[in-house]
Image: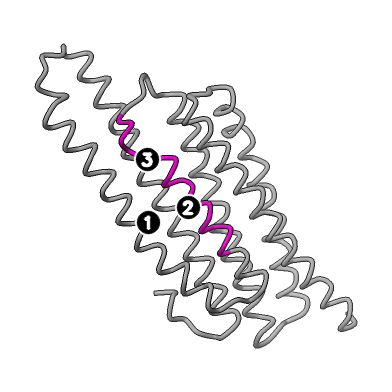
Amino acid sequence: MARKEYQQKLDALREDVLYMGEVVQERLRMGLAALEDKDEELAEEVITRDAEVNEMYLELERECTDLIALQQPVAGDLRFIAASFKIITDLERIADLATNLGNYTKQATRNLYPDVDVQGIGSVTLEMIEASLAAYAHEDVAACYEIAQRDDDLDERCERASEVVVRDLIETELGDGTDEEEVENMLQDVSRLLLTIRDLERVGDHAVNISARTLYMVENDDELLF
């Protein structure tokens, strides 16, 4: 394969990864919107369309594998292909977490804890994904470190949100004479809310992973990988 054609395939891989990133971000937005509005129809769409992301992942996996097997890239090109493969893995997992939001929406029986800003946390994770993909697109090393730092703030925000839920549950919900069935339903809803917070925290972790792989791709620096 001529060098020009080979470079075109590398460029196409980058564009395909970025397109997958756009699709995954949209799925996460849909999952958050379904959760906010308790929109079961939208939630079902998020769930059923996860198969599209899985197909996209498998196709990009084949692209990466073919480039490695047929071209035997070295140095920077090999790091780029390997990083791209790892990034699509993180994107596929983010899509799975968006699907979780769809499932939580369908299972919830009531709205809980308006003081817990799930949408605000979700917005932060979306910003982190967008920034991490921009860093990958433009090979922006400085942005990789900035995203990793933002994850610390996200972790703190998620921890505070979880504490609000647990404290309120202990102090008020279980002591007001509700019957056993209501308590069981409430505990299930609380569990789903805590899982939502945890899943959004994981989205942030995947955004950091994308940045870590970009840093390694550009600088051969594994500082953010571990």
Quadrant of the snapshot with the C terminus: bottom left
Q: What residue type is disc 1 on?
A: Leu
Which structural element holds mark 2?
A: helix
- Tell which residue pokes out farthest to the bottom in this image: 75
The residue sitting at 60% across, 82% down in the picture is 218
Provide the major secondary structure of the magenta segment: helix
**Label number found at residue 117:** 3
**Label number found at residue 125:** 2
Q: Using the rendered view, name the quadrant where residue 210 is placed.
A: bottom right
- Magenta segment, which residues? 113-132
Which structural element holds mark 1?
A: helix
Q: Using the rendered view, name the quadrant where residue 161 is placed.
A: top left
**For this rendering, which residue is in front, 159 or 1?**
159
Lower sequence index among marks 3 and 2: 3
Q: What residue type is disc 3 on?
A: Asp
Which structural element holds mark 3?
A: loop
Contact (Cβ within 8 Å) of mark 2 with mark 1: yes
Q: Is residue 99 above or below residue 22?
A: above
Which residue is label 1 attached to?
154
Q: What residue type is disc 2 on?
A: Thr
Q: Is residue 185 left or right of residue 35?
A: left
Q: Is residue 20 above or below residue 15?
A: above
